[in-house]
Image (cartoon, rainbow, N blue to C red):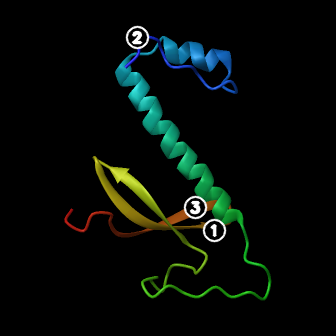
């Protein structure tokens, strides 16, 4: 490893870079986890916004519960250092979720 700090992305605002540079390693790890979770949330919301073209039917996955719409996607949530699959879909302005199972079946 180099003794030089990493170079921040050029599109990152300087106030964000300065705040990160002043943060402790633990805070930086918290920020990294939050940023990753937020990015997944926003990507998931964008996918849920995409509508199926009119007249086009999607095949219903075999493991999709009856009370979960066909447009639902699978997402991973981390809770207490364990990872779980959830079905997620949008109903109006709200994002709904339903538990599917652990990412690692041994959990």
Tell me the element at label 1.
Answer: strand
**Callout 3 crowding tier (Cα within 10 Å): few <14, some 14–19, many ≥20:** few
Mark toward the viewer: 3 or 2: 2
Which residue matches tag 2? Answer: 3
* Residue 56 figure quarter: bottom right
**Would you place residue 96 above or below residue 78 in this image?**
below
**Measured from the top left, where is residue 64 in percent x and y?**
46, 82
**Measured from the top left, where is residue 14 in percent x and y?**
66, 16
* Residue 13 figure quarter: top right
Closer to the camera in the image, 97 or 8: 8
Tell me the element at label 2.
Answer: loop
**Callout 2 crowding tier (Cα within 10 Å): few <14, some 14–19, many ≥20:** few
Residue 45's mark?
none
**Callout 1 crowding tier (Cα within 10 Å): few <14, some 14–19, many ≥20:** few
Mark toward the viewer: 1 or 2: 2
Residue 91's mark?
1
Q: Are marks 3 and 2 in contact (CB under 8 Å)?
A: no
Residue 95's mark?
3
Q: Quadrant of the C terminus?
A: bottom left
Q: Are marks 3 and 1 in contact (CB under 8 Å)?
A: yes
Cα distance between the residues tagged 3 and 1: 6 Å
Reading the chain from its start, which is encountered first: label 1 or label 2? Answer: 2
Reading the chain from its start, which is encountered first: label 3 or label 2? Answer: 2
Residue drawn at x 63%, y 26% is 9
The mark total stands at 3
Tell me the element at label 3.
Answer: strand
Residue drawn at x 39%, y 16% is 24
Closer to the camera in the image, 92 or 72: 72
Q: Are marks 1 and 2 in contact (CB under 8 Å)?
A: no
């Amino acid at each position: 490893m180099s003794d030089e700090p990493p170079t921040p992305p050029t599109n990152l605002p300087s106030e964000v870079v300065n705040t990160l540079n002043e943060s402790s390693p633990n805070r930086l790890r918290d920020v990294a986890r939050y940023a990753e979770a937020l990015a997944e949330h926003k990507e998931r919301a964008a996918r849920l916004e995409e509508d199926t073209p009119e007249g086009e039917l999607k095949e219903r996955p075999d493991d999709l519960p009856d009370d979960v719409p066909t447009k639902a996607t699978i997402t991973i949530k981390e809770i207490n250092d364990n990872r779980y699959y959830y079905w997620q879909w949008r109903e109006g302005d709200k994002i709904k979720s339903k538990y599917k199972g652990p990412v690692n079946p041994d959990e």
